[in-house]
Amino acid sequence: MDDVLLRSLTPQVLGILVRRGADFATAEDAVQEALVEAVRGWPADPPRDPKAWLVTVAWRKFLDATRATTSRRRREDRFEDEPAPGLVPAQDDTLALYFLCAHPSLTTSAAVALTLRAVGGLTTRQIAAAYLVPETTMAQRITRAKRTVAGVRLDQPGDVATVLRVLYLVFNEGYSGDVDLAAEAIRLTRQLAAAVQHPEVSGLLALMLLTHARRPARTTPDGSLVPLADQDRSRWDTGLIAEGITILQTALARDRLGEFQAQAAIAALHADALAAAETDWVQILEWYDELVALTDNPVARLNRAVAVGEADGPRAGLAALATLDDSLPRHAAVAAYLHERDGDLATAARLYAEAAHRAPNLAERDHLTRQAARLNQQ
Amino acid sequence: MAKYLLLKHYRGAPAPVNNVAMDRWTPTELEDHFQFMRDFSARLEASGEMVDAQALAPEGSWVRYDGEGRPPVVDGPFAETKDLIAGWMVIDVDSHERALELAGELSAAPGANGEPIHEWLEVRPFMSAPPTFTE
């Protein structure tokens, strides 16, 4: 059994411990310890029933931890207050844990960290490495998060939208350290989709799959960004694209549109084009109109201006852009692109340089600097 | 989740409100200041927002390549250098507002007469990794 398969049992095992009356914080530590023991011992001595093994070991760890504290009496009292373990299906536990870890009382970074540990089964060290902070910092963040949700009962209903936001952020973080956060976000979103029927969960999963499919073409081996129009489309993962489109179509058929379905529809239309010139920008623009109507998000409006430029010409794109606040991130980059399409190379070069100056990361800055330099050489 | 550098200057920042050189403070004022800094760090560690904190010695050298097979040129320190960094804190916080809030608290470290120094701190965002959803 590989590491990911083992970790996929995390929420089920944790759910069982909590249903037996364990408090969430202690149970979560106990499950982590059991996972560590499994990673160490299973290669030589694999259990017949991995889940039962994890439950047994984690429960023993939980009892050890409980006995070790001086507040034993208090904990025992609390046991008696807890409801008797019921025969709730494991999927409900999984869903309840997603809600708990994305609870609105948590800050975003706390929700992300707690989700990756308690639902994803990652170690604190792995999460710290992925977010480039010291392990002690991440440990504190998780401890505080657990304290924040200590009073929340696992059977309280939650909001799927808060969970989706956390998973979206994990996916967007990409890849650093030894954990592929994009792949982990996809795994956790798949698991969520199996636990709850919700068109926006499917929408986000489709969006992730369709975006992930382009990853091999998105950067050169040296890390430089390759814009969508210049990507080698033969390197897109057709299996992920097909899966993403199927999931999206099923979701759209339920006729409850949301922002993730709209974004996935745009990604699907890009995926459909065998060459950049074949992109159906008119349909993409229609989806951006839907997206703007759903979210009124300034970033969606900015991307819509690009689509307007492609569908109706750069002048129309610039007119759409003129209605937006020019302090928006990437505003100058979009303006530069549209001016270049419009033939005003001097303005485009100046705006690319300005965009490079305001770029939020090195890969984008380098890319924009190259665009400015290319135009200045002409 | 974004990282920020809180930069403290020996020289080059605008003058603080409570502008008395540290070597003119009373021993109690100094100890109160050091304790404030330790408490501030401890609080960031406990909140899971601390990444790194370092201090730099004021002296330093300027170094440059001087051609193939030659040792690098070493010069300085130049007394006229306007900007002299004293140290930094790297924090990992949920928002730009939170970074400003923490810098504001750090700037309130006590100085002479136990009053806040109102020192100017420079807050600089880190360049992040490129996000996945940008296309």
Image: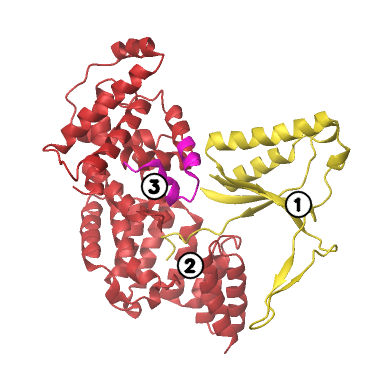
Q: CA distance from mark 3 to mark 2?
A: 39 Å
**Disc 1: CA contacts within 10 A as few (<14), some (14-19) or many (>=20):** some
Residue A8 visible (yes or no): no
Is residue B84 placed above or below A17 in the rendered structure?
Answer: below
Q: CA distance from mark 1 to mark 2?
A: 43 Å
The image quarter containing residue B108 is: top right
Looking at the picture, tell me which residue is in the foreground, A318 or B45: B45
Instruction: State yes or no: discs 3 and 2 in contact (Cβ < 8 Å).
Output: no
Q: Amino acid at mark 1?
A: His
Q: In the rendered structure, which disc, 3 or 2, sits on the residue that comes first in sequence?
A: 3
Image quarter where the C terminus of chain A lies is: bottom right
Q: Which residue is mark 1?
A: B9
Q: Which residue is mark 3?
A: A126
- In the rendered structure, find residue A305 and report the number of the disc placed on it: 2
Is residue A188 placed above or below A366 in the rendered structure?
Answer: above
- Both labels 3 and 2 in a single chain: yes
Closer to the eye: label 3 or 2: 3
Is residue A128 placed above or below B60 in the rendered structure?
Answer: above
Rendered hue of chain B is yellow
The image quarter containing residue A18 is: top left
SS assignment at label 1:
strand
Residue at left offset 40%, top offset 41%: A124
Q: Position of residue A35 (x, y in %)?
A: 28, 38
Q: Position of residue B98 (x, y in %)?
A: 60, 42
- Both labels 3 and 1 in a single chain: no
Magenta segment includes A224: no
